[in-house]
Image (cartoon, rainbow, N blue to C red):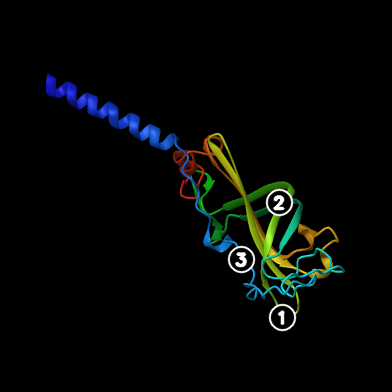
Amino acid sequence: MKRLSLLRLLLVAGIVASISGCATVAPKHEPAAFAPTYPIAAEPEAPKNGGLYQVNNSMNLFQDGKAYRVGDLLTVVLQENTNAQKQASTSTSKDQSISMGAPNLFGGPVQYNGRDILSANVNQGNEFSGAGSTTQSNSLRGNVTVFVSQVLPNGNLVVRGEKQLTLNQGSEYVRFSGIVRPSDISPNNTVPSTRVANAEILYHGEGAMADANRMGWLARFFNGPLWPF
């Protein structure tokens, strides 16, 4: 009895430990593809000679604040709207009729018990009707600040970055990457997402809220293509 009680105690302790481990939100590691890109290291600091103007202290009085170098920051204004609608309708029908009268053999009809046994009449018909409709709408609003990871030979900027937000037992993050034309950057160093080429936007959530809004694996199996019915 003591051994059985000890086994039950160990089993309960293991279940509690596993539940506690699942409830803990592990810190999310930043993907290598979105790691910050730092600008090229500046030249060694020149010795100070006591003058008001120093070579190593840049004072660009007429330079704007737009991003143009590797490591510069740029704010992307997310203005994504997608609306898709598709309808399809198909209808087919076919009717066919074949009739053959009773033939005469050796000058008289072929009958059995007063019925023509060689006469035939075939009627065939089929009909199909199908209809389908689908509608999808998505909207994404917000701002995400990215950094310049590469300057292309034509001057376009390759940007990427992400924003992570963790509240209670859930976390959400937005990842953005694309190619920006410098002329599309506004004076306040922002660019709309609709003006970004090859844009890749990923919005995803993890944690208790995301798990509660996710279909279970058994339900996904019954709704998947492997289910024959």
Residue for point 44% across, 34% down = 23
Instruction: Categorize mark 3 by other alpha carbons within 10 Å: few (<14), some (14-19), many (20+).
Output: some
Mark 3 residue type: Thr
Which tag, 2 or 3, sits closer to the chain's start? 3
Decide which of 6, 138 is in the foreground and name it: 6
Residue 215: x and y in percent read 52, 39
Mark 1 residue type: Pro
Residue for point 79% across, 72% down = 53
Q: Is residue 17 left or right of residue 41?
A: left
Instruction: Categorize mark 2 by other alpha carbons within 10 Å: few (<14), some (14-19), many (20+).
Output: few
The residue identified by callout 3 is 37
What's the distance in space between the residues labelled 1 and 2, CA to CA?
A: 56 Å
**Which structural element holds mark 2?**
strand
Q: Where is 96 relative to 53, above or below? A: above
Q: Are marks 2 and 3 in contact (CB under 8 Å)?
A: no
Name the disc covering residue 153, or none.
Answer: 1
The residue identified by callout 2 is 91
Instruction: Categorize mark 1 by other alpha carbons within 10 Å: few (<14), some (14-19), many (20+).
Output: few
